[in-house]
Amino acid sequence: MTRTILPSRTSSLARLNRVLAGKAFDNARFFVLVDENTYTHCLPRLISYVDRLQQAEFMEVPVGEECKDIAIATQLWQTLLESNADRQTILVNIGGGCITDLGGFVAAGYKRGIRYINIPTTLIGMVDAAIGGKTALNLNGSKNQVGFFHQPEIICIEPAFLNTLPDSEVLNGVFEMLKTFLIGDPVQYDRLCQMLLNGTFEIIPDMIASCAEIKTAIVKQDPRDLGIRRILNLGHTFGHAIEAYSHHNGQTPLAHGKAVGIGLICALYLSVRKLGLDPAILDRYRTVTTKLVSLPHYTLRDTEGILSYMRQDKKNANNDILCVLLQNLSAPVIDLPVPENEIRDALLKIS
Ligand code: GLY
């Protein structure tokens, strides 16, 4: 069972220090996986709090998606092997979603599975990517095509790391928070929308903790993503395709979180039409999103391009495009087949 150290009044890293001083970690040998950014901006803080990591060995990989590659995973396995890392080894992944995806994959494969700890340093990592045991590499330019389910031993969420990030990176995580609150907490959803509309948004640790708790509870019910966990994909069928299209078709490349934010408009639009969602929920969400990103105006040609990515989505079955939609706040419905003409309509009505 994963132990999650959530943001609270005392430093999460100080609490991690106490946990790692416990008996369960007596024989552990620690390796820390970083990228260039977290090596410079996050590692000094981690080591200053967590005594057991002062003797750890460090492994550095390139920043971003390029690290999620089998050649890099192989290099890391070789480093572990050459260092005589045994099954008591614990891999500590400190970084964003790319580092936790790669590190989890390496931990899952090494000697048929060693323990690992995720310390997310991005908002998207804190509220989503580092939680739930999905590990992944990219293959032939396609994201997350190979991976294992392998749950982390500990997830330590320390909001202080967010101070090392540019605002645009934090914004990516805000859209995942909106999604999580749409499916799981109407009160926090209202509060977050209000803050964003007032322009008074600052990262509130208790909101991060709520998001992490909602995701943890969903993963606990369906760790292998066979049913209910798919509610976490609200906005993602559109979002992934919008993101991929923006990277390959001479458009301004959209980051994952922003693409999901735009995809959520499509999902809510279809929810109004197909499930009778209150249109005021769509209107408010669109107003909030308009304050944060400039919404794309797609042509029919764009919709064909985006649809071609949606058809490849690994969540589709029987050639239907399956979407998660919302009947009401906190009432998501999974696996709804949506005809392509309705997908086109939703994309054309984003702005
Ligand atoms: N990010 C969706 C999931 O973990 O299932």
Image: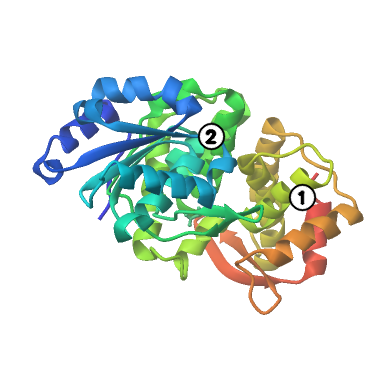
For label 2, count other residues whose C-alpha is less than 10 Å away and answer few (under 14), some (14-19) or many (20+): some
Q: Which residue is mark 2?
A: 62
Q: Could you say where residue 251 lies in the image, as x and y percent from the top left? A: 82, 40
For the residues carrying marks 1 and 2, which lies nearer the camera in this image? 2
Q: Which residue is mark 1?
A: 245
29 to 282, vertically: above or below:
above
- Residue shown at the point (63%, 76%) measured from the top left: 317
- N-term mark: 1 or 2: 2
Q: Could you say where residue 303 lies in the image, as x and y percent from the top left? A: 84, 56
Secondary structure state at the residue bearing disc 1: helix
Question: Which quadrant would residue 44 be assigned to in this image?
Answer: top left
- Residue shown at the point (62%, 28%) measured from the top left: 168
Q: Along the line of sight, which residue is nearer the eye, 291 or 106?
A: 106
Screen quadrant of the C terminus: top right
- Residue shown at the point (13%, 46%) measured from the top left: 24
Q: Could you say where residue 330 lies in the image, as x and y percent from the top left? A: 49, 56
How far apart in space, not on screen, are marks 1 and 2 (Cα)?
Answer: 24 Å
For label 1, count other residues whose C-alpha is less than 10 Å away and answer few (under 14), some (14-19) or many (20+): many
Question: Which quadrant would residue 288 be assigned to in this image?
Answer: top right
- Residue shown at the point (53%, 47%) measured from the top left: 68
